[in-house]
Amino acid sequence: MTGDIHFNKQDFGDDFSWGVATAAYQIEGAVDEDGRGPCVWDKFANIKGKIKNGDNAHTACDFYHRYEADIELVRALGFKEFRFSISWSRILPQGFGEINEAGIAFYNRLIDKCLSLNIVPWITLYHWDLPQGLEDLGGWKNRNIMEWFESYATICAKAFGDRVKKWIVLNEPMAVVGLGYTTGLHAPGRKSIGNFLPVVHHLAMCQAIGGAAIRQNVADAYVGTAVSCSYVHAASAELKDIRAAKRADALMNRLFIEPALGMGYPIDAFGFLGNIKKYMHAGDAERLRFDFDFIGIQNYFSVVVKHSYFAPVVWLKEVPAKLRNVPVTAMGWEISGDGMYDILKQFSAYKGIKEIIVSENGAAFQDHVEANEIHDTERKSFYQEYLTAILKAKKDGINVRGYLAWTLMDNFEWAEGYAARFGLVYLDFQSQKRIIKDSGKWFASFLKT
Ligand code: BGC
């Protein structure tokens, strides 16, 4: 089955981690069970027109009840590692204050199930599902989030750190600020450029604060944080397009990693960021820094950017992949293994990054069930193309140490609802039946070699 590619598992080395990634809100369901409090996505999904087809995540993949069988599926696919996120409002229904022991108990059961199958658990502390109680107090715009987050991180580290060593503090903070607080396309649906800088700063502070809380409370922790990143090309050699590409790069790729590395915000490429000083208190510049063991790179596509007079503040726009005559996924994202290589190379140039994990990568395509099978050839080729690029990067000396595919099974794809399928396992959301797609079967045979 692996005859059509030019690499095998051994080429990545014995110490390379292979896993699949998920996120609590996208798979768990059971939003009202066992004392869980509401999160921003519960409220957002109830607003008409926010989620495609009026979908919601009340049941999602019902992972809350089916986690045991789903972890068996992780094993069936040949993966040795499983990334999941903790639902903050299961642990602290209000966001702070009293701990919900039933929430802790659920993640204990999940972790123990992973360990019983020799699957290494990875915890993401924050994958976008802020407790609604905290949002009512201003959410990520309120500086008190630093205390709320520190206490939440400490509780999780103490509860699970005896068995879980691999930790990711934040998942893609740029999506939280960009989609959640600036364009309003994601929960909590706040739409104002005035939110941008304070939210960026509080997220960047929490990135470091969460890292420190884990390191302090978990013996032998391997602590990282995960950023979205896309290699940026300028649409032309004109100076205005080149500058637009630099601004886009500052926003999409540099904004959260550079403060963590002690380099400050990338004001050189995007002057507007200089105003962030207004939200910085004495000592913040140092507190932004944290010595992560690894950085999680989440790459799906690369982008082409040009100057635009119609986009105030950023003065740029993306040239959509569809107009560029390049292959795209069902999300309209350009398929480009070269983009993965380029972004790995870009991140590896930072001296402060010790190790890189590709903590998410995958693709949505239209899947069709034929006689209980899903022949998702495009997804299989997508994975092969990106893995080829990662292997090339590794051979070129880039310190990439692991790969977590996005994602185990089709799930609640945020504002796309159930319309976009990213899984290696197909989900029939009516019956909750799971079917391993051809791409999943390919992984199983590849990981066995
Ligand atoms: C997010 C996932 C999401 C995936 C595909 C990533 O940005 O972390 O939650 O499902 O992209 O859109």
Image (tube, rainbow, N blue to C red):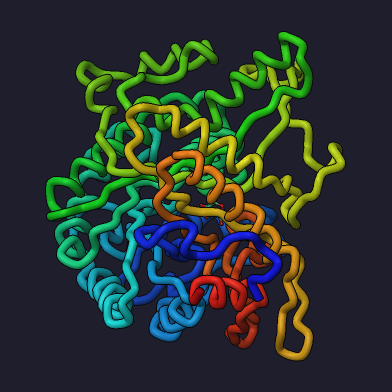
Q: Quadrant of residue 370?
A: bottom right
Q: Residue at x 50, y 56 (%)?
A: 41
User: Looking at the image, which is closer to me, 227 or 64?
Assistant: 227
Q: Quadrant of residue 416?
A: bottom right
Looking at the image, residue 52 sits to the left or right of residue 146; the answer is right
Q: Is residue 54 visible?
A: no
Residue 320 percent location from the top left of the image: 78, 37
- Residue 179 position (above or below residue 107): above
Task: Give the total of numbered labels.
Answer: 0
Looking at the image, residue 88 sits to the left or right of residue 376; the answer is left
- Residue 128 position (above or below residue 80): above
**Quadrant of the rendering where the N terminus is positioned:** bottom right
Residue 312 percent location from the top left of the image: 67, 18
Residue 111 percent location from the top left of the image: 28, 73
Q: Residue at x 41, y 58 (%)?
A: 13
User: Looking at the image, which is closer to me, 69 or 135?
Assistant: 69
User: Looking at the image, which is closer to me, 177 or 321?
Assistant: 321
Most extreme residue toward the bottom, as rendered?
371
Looking at the image, residue 321 sits to the left or right of residue 172; the answer is right
Q: Is residue 147 visible?
A: yes
Q: Residue at x 76, y 67 (%)?
A: 366
Residue 258 percent location from the top left of the image: 39, 26
Q: Residue at x 41, y 17 (%)?
A: 276
